[in-house]
Image (spheres, grey):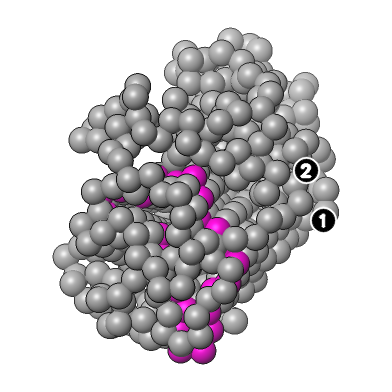
Amino acid sequence: MRDDDVPATYGMLHGRIDAVLLSRSVPRVLQAHAVSQQVLFSSLLLAVTLACACSKDEAEAPDGSAPRDGGGVDATTADAGPPLDSASGEDGGAVPSCAAALGSALPPLLAESTGAVHYVAMTGADDGPGTLEQPWRTVEKAFAALGPGETAYVRAGTYGARGTRYDVSATGAPGMTVTIRGYPGDPRPVLLGFWVVTGTELRLSGFVFDGPTGDVGNTQPGSNGEEVLLWIQASDGLELSSSELRNDLWRGGIFVSGSHRVFIVGNDVRDNGDRSNPDEANLQHGIYWAGSGPGLIANNVFDHNYAFGVHLYPDADGVIVTGNTLLAQGRSGVIVSGDATSSSDDCIVVNNVAVFNDQYGIRDFWGGPEGTGDVARTNLVFGNTEGETYATVMTIEDSVEADPGFVDRAARDYHLAAGSAAIDRGLPEYALPYDHDGRCHDATPDLGAFER
């Protein structure tokens, strides 16, 4: 698929399902993968640095200067990167070592980057060396310049511009991941515009993709030129973690196509879709995953997206959807589906909280060939308008139908209150060591994105 094919292709895939899906439903999932617990732990440990960043008193200045307390990076230690061993949890303490043996059915995540370290800041210049004192200016430069195993830390600020499309790529190697992430302790850097990313062994972590994209040339009727915030295409080994994707006005937060081993972990995907446009009510999702797999969607919060939270359609094979909290979607929380010629097979929907959505918590739909091996297991479903689950061929088992007991739903605090029916109900083989916030799961993990 060419980069300039996205508007036509995206609309074509949706067009085959939109009219039918208004009255029917979909779910299915199951495939075990070998796991390396050491890789899982080390990858998530650094992700926690961003998800549970230092307190404001410890934060570095957005202008690229070193940490105020003098304990971080200076010109003499720039190549070593920021002090990641000071990663903190929500209480500001050190990240605990997670003892529970979890995730045996999950695929191994990407290796950590151990090569040269570079920096991007609003005060930088792309013709500079990319050091802490002379950082690069743009995120695009980091994509273009990094080699296998290298890292770029992006200081706080707003990068890109609405109305602009950014086609970027980076190539790592097995065990030598390219990492582009927000600088620990800074507010997360904000990315504007339409980002089209292709990567091999590539990690993006700790960003805010802030919509709308602005007019980037989309010619589909009703688009006003707008696009999805992030398109992951033709990638093999790409992680998006600890980021927020919000306020898109056309087809949602994330579009994944033609890719393998994509890991969507610990993100907040919210308020995407133009709710003033009824023609888009079935088309604007939190994440739209097509023609890709295997992959992992874990520990995310999908909140108030116009259509589906997670839309697997079509040819979404071997995707594990685990430990997510999905609520207030305009359609269903999760849908596993196919079009007139292709199904989605061997998908697993497990350990999720899918509640208060306008159709179902979890469902399936088949426009042609029916999927095989799809399973939804041990999910909490409650308060969904048309029913908790709906399946024609997908296996649904061991659902928990009870109020999730959020701390404060009105304030969008979806942590679990004491006595929640989601506590200690998860299957450990499908749980990552950490939750959305970086807390350790215990041996019997809670359902949804947050461990109590």
Residue 119 point in image, percent of width and height: 66, 38
Instruction: Please give the name of the residue rendered at 48% of the width and 21% of the height, measured from the top-left corner.
Output: 90
Total marks shown come to 2
> Which residues lie in the magenta part?
334-357
Question: Dot 1 corresponds to which residue?
Answer: 173
Instruction: Name the side, left or right, on which 217 lies relative to 202.
Output: left
Between tags 2 and 1, which lies in front? 2
Residue 68 point in image, percent of width and height: 56, 14
Residue 295 visible in the displayed image: yes
Count residues near mark 1 (Cα–Cα under 10 Å), then give few for <14, some for 14-19, many for 20+: some
Instruction: Name the side, left or right, on which 423 lies relative to 442.
Output: left
Q: Is residue 338 magenta?
A: yes
Q: Nearer the viewer, residue 364 or 142?
A: 364
Q: Is residue 430 magenta?
A: no
Please say if 386 is above or below 135. Answer: below
Q: Nearer the viewer, residue 190 or 432?
A: 432
Look at the image and tell me in which quarter the N terminus lies: bottom right
- Mark 2: amino acid: Ser
Count residues near mark 2 (Cα–Cα under 10 Å), then give few for <14, some for 14-19, many for 20+: some
Q: Nearer the viewer, residue 185 or 108?
A: 108
- Mark 1: amino acid: Ala
Instruction: Please give the name of the residue rendered at 16% of the width and 65% of the height, measured from the top-left corner.
Output: 276
Question: Dot 2 corresponds to which residue?
Answer: 36
Q: Earlier in the sequence, mark 2 or mark 1?
A: 2
Mark 1 element type: loop
Look at the image and tell me in which quarter the C terminus lies: top left
Instruction: Name the side, left or right, on which 200 lies relative to 207.
Output: right
Residue 272 point in image, percent of width and height: 32, 57
Residue 101 point in image, percent of width and height: 70, 32
Q: CA distance from mark 2 to mark 1?
A: 17 Å
Q: Nearer the viewer, residue 3 or 39?
A: 39
